Amino acid sequence: MKFSSLGNNQVFQELSSSKGVLIKTGPFNVSVRSDSAEFGNLLAWFYRDFPLLTKDNIFDYHISLSRTRGIRRYWRTQICFRLDNRDLFEPFPSRYGLPLFEWGMNWCIATQAHRYLLLHASVVERNGLAIILPAFPGSGKSTLCAALIHRGWRLFSDEFGIVRPENGMVIPLPRPIPLKNESIDVIRKFAPNVEIGPLFPKTRKGTVAHLRVPTSSVEGMYVEALPRWVIFPRYQSSAKVDIVPIPKSYALLKLATNSFNYGVLGKKGFILVGNIIRSCDCYDFTYGNLDDAVNRLNDLAMGCHA
Amino acid sequence: MHRIQNTKAARSLLIDLIVYPENAICLKPLEWDFLLRMARSSRLLGRLGKQLESQGFYSSLPEKVNDYLAGAQALVERQQRMAHWEINRLQRSLSEFDIDIIVLKGCGYLISEIPVSVGRSFSDVDIMVSKRYIEDVENHLIEKGWRSDKLDEYDQRYYRDWMHEVPPLRHRDRSMEVDLHHTILPLTCKLKPNANFLFQQAIDVRGCQFKVLAADDMVLHSATHLFYGSELNGDLRDLVDLNDLFNYFSTTNESFWLALNNRAVELELQRPLFYALRYCRKLLGTSIPDFVFENIKTGTPAGWIIWIMDLLVPAAILPEHPDFPSRLTAIARWLLYVRSHYLRMPLYLLIPHFFRKSIKRQKLIPAMVKFNKDTTAN
């Protein structure tokens, strides 16, 4: 059963119940509770294609987005993120429930999902092969990722490269992609049929808006893939597209140090990252224009057969 | 199927799982859903995982349970690595000190490799030196790169002047906290076990220049720390430690119980031992011979005190159902929090200390997103 099968009233009813709305997002089962209708509407819109689970499951995260009590319930209203009924973060203005939910979920996964290797990277897939795009400041990875998934690539994740230790496969975790500032308009022009949610201005990252995951990527969430390329993107305005192979030793260090839990996994993390680097072609990738960047990566993928 | 929606029933299931891990195969997903979180908040997931693994149940558990356990295991292993490394660095830095240095509590279990350390996480390293060396040792560690963790002037005074303790240290390159002690309870506490006795009986550890407490002292320290040094706030893990220590030492040493009794009298720690024995037996069903209780009758508190503690301790020490918090638990925890401070600090220090703590804001993770002042208007 999908989220979209719930009517508006039902959504709010489920959100307010003791168990909450039960969503499967990638490998994680999430229970979401809330007393904010505004947040509930956005959640339903962004996650409408996602499968709902029954109560007879074990959930990874039990999250609630609750309007704060006391005077803040009526004046300069706020909303707070709770995990297992514990306040973790400072509250946000009540309109910002959705970005708070997304960032809070990221924190939960990054600090707890140590059953997997968690790379800080975007991952996209085509023909059964995945590109890992590690996130460095200035990489523009979210914009590039958003562009790729509207040109034939399947979204695995914008934020987490989740690797299964047993076999090195990357696991999809499709979730709304946060776009910042100019990227929002850039992607609107690039893919006019794109679905972008409301703007959230004046955050620390500037104005943020979220891109809805294409239905095909949501439906593909059960299909894992082997990584084939590790590509370190770097956006440089007006730069020509350039893709340069890099030494594997350098790639290993860059990938490892840009992982959420490499340190937690210790030796196992080292071996896993080493395996990825060994089995992938590794490149530095500079681009100034999205169309050129996407075309270049499409060429790369076509030149290779699974 | 009836859903468990209250703390009491949930706790009962959790204890059943801790004491009889083989019952794991009967659990339903709905039950696992809250039990795993309760075990995690009690820091017992690592231990549970190891028990299930050793009894061969891993493959018959739901996949999500394995996910939780694997995640917990990764964190436990990381903590153990960090603890080992910190102890290694401490040994290296203190190698020129020809004095007895005892590793206490969790890290003591770790370096002496007793079963209670399996699956256990460690948040800090506790070492004890004789009072006359403590200043030298602290200064030496600071020279070698450790820094005093609590830089607030009030906190420094709290530790040094009032509690007669060294504030926690942390090496500038690492995240592990090191607590330097000269005794096992603050000097302001009513109970004053003689630290020299502990040093006299301390035992060597193979391959390590540090020592650990003897078996009976380990147990007494754990009991004292739990019932006189902590707030009992969800500290089920510490009670489980005691259960594991009792079980291990009593099966490997015939005269353990008698030695424990005698030592409690010698160190005047009958009261914390009484509580440890009582609540291990009551809550975890630990097998303890009756004569052990008899022999510390002098330390047994008055009937009305036992009655109150019987109400408060289980309510405070056990975790709540994560979705249905209990008001009673909150009250019990607050009362025992007050008790723990009352036992450690004289009233003339206690009252201003509480006042100050109540105005200090609760620490939350700084907002991931900062807002300009205008954003708050809707």
Image (cartoon, coloured by chain):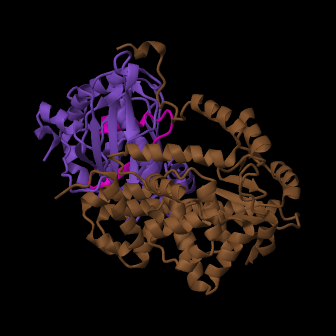
Chain colours: A purple, B brown
Quick check: A221 left or right of A280? left
The residue at 88%/64% (across/down) is: B96
Along the line of sight, which residue is nearer the eye, B44 or B320? Answer: B320
Q: Point out residue A266 in the picture as x, y percentages from the top left corner.
A: 55, 61
Along the line of sight, which residue is nearer the eye, A179 or A266? Answer: A266
Is residue A129 rendered magenta in the image? yes
Decide if residue B49 is in sight here: yes
* Residue A3 image-quadrant placement: top left
Is B272 above or below relative to B243?
above
Is A207 above or below relative to B360?
above
Along the line of sight, which residue is nearer the eye, B302 or A296? Answer: B302
The residue at 36%/65% (across/down) is: B66
Along the line of sight, which residue is nearer the eye, A232 or B165? Answer: B165
Q: Which residues are magenta?
A: A126-149
Is A105 above or below relative to A302?
above
* Residue B58 image-quadrant placement: bottom left
Q: Quadrant of the C terminus of chain B?
A: top left
